Image: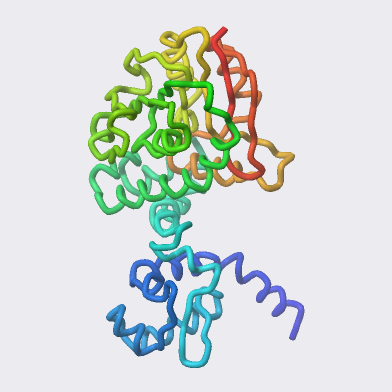
Amino acid sequence: MTKSQIETIHSAPLIQGFTLTQSASSMIKTGIADALYSQSLSLTQLAKETQLSLKNLARFLRLLKLQNLVQKTGAYYTLTPSSAPLARKHPESITYSTLMHEHILYLSWQELPYCLQDHRLGFEKKFNSPLYEYLKKTPEQLEIFKGWMKESHRDWIIPILNQFNFNHFNTIIDIGGSEGHLCQHLLHQYPQLKANLIDDPMVLKTVKNPYPNRLFLSPGSIFEPPPIQGDIYILSRVLLNWSDEMALKILNSIYSQMPPSSQLLIIDFINDDSNPQSMSPLVDINLMVLFGTQTRSLGEFSRLLTQSQFQVSEVLTHPSTVSLIVATPN
């Protein structure tokens, strides 16, 4: 084999990486992942359960075996440790994360060269609409987006929340908290807590509230939240969607209603080029193509907080995902 042939083989993941995402999402959409979860099936059994073409399924399974997404023992197929989370029943399922990457993110990234030329949004060029307007018009993609947010909350937000002690607080105000996953996690962990979830009225209509006596839904805007006082104010993955100008409006609005003894928690990605495990560079480009915004360094967060009359009192970090900035009003 020539050097050129070897280099071509080695470059295959570079140019064919999309096939892995498409294979994984196809396993979800066709029911293969769910059918093989916790059981082994023959080709005939799997074709019957998924109602797929026997011939084409056999061809697809050959590829999945090559991609280490299924394994074959005798005549029976099972999921691999890598593909098991594709099943919806898996406790750490990545079903919606996979579907989000397969459609919205994949198509938005196709416009990355366009984004790199100026400040226009790849998503809007591809879909002729801002992301949230598009989601309102496409219920299937909205469901995927919500599922992705829930899965990423489990994988990114809960680990950093668990580093902060909420035992000495009574009331949290979650601003822009969407369907309330953060509030519900904290209410489960800390029985003394009560929470106010502030978001758009249309968002709050979809919230399933298992704590009706402790979790209060408060319609409002992140730019003008209702004047509700608490011990802890939380902005979880909110500021990354906005420019510095709009982020300052959010912070100034919160400052204007906070009691002097309260604290602000900002949960977000922090740029740190010295950390090779950080997801921030990837998230940064996701933000570029989706919203035209960017991740920030700790210094950039500190400047925003100083301009809105806060001071940073503590920073809790995670090796690869989000960090937690604790700020107090001056």
Instruction: Report x, y in % for residue 170.
Output: 45, 21
On screen, residue 30 above or below 254: below
Q: How many marks?
A: 0
On screen, residue 151 above or below 323: below
Q: Quadrant of the N terminus?
A: bottom right
Q: Is residue 310 among the parts visible in the rendering?
A: yes
On screen, residue 71 above or below 290: below
Residue at the bottom extreme, as displayed: 74
Instruction: Report x, y in % for residue 26.
Output: 39, 69
Is residue 144 or residue 285 the one in the foreground? 144
The residue located at (47%, 32%) in the rendering is: 190
Q: Is residue 1 left or right of residue 163?
A: right
Residue at the front extreme, as displayed: 191
Q: Is residue 18 left or right of residue 174?
A: right
Can you tell which quarter of the image residue 210 is in? top left
The residue located at (65%, 69%) in the rendering is: 11
Q: Quadrant of the C terminus?
A: top right
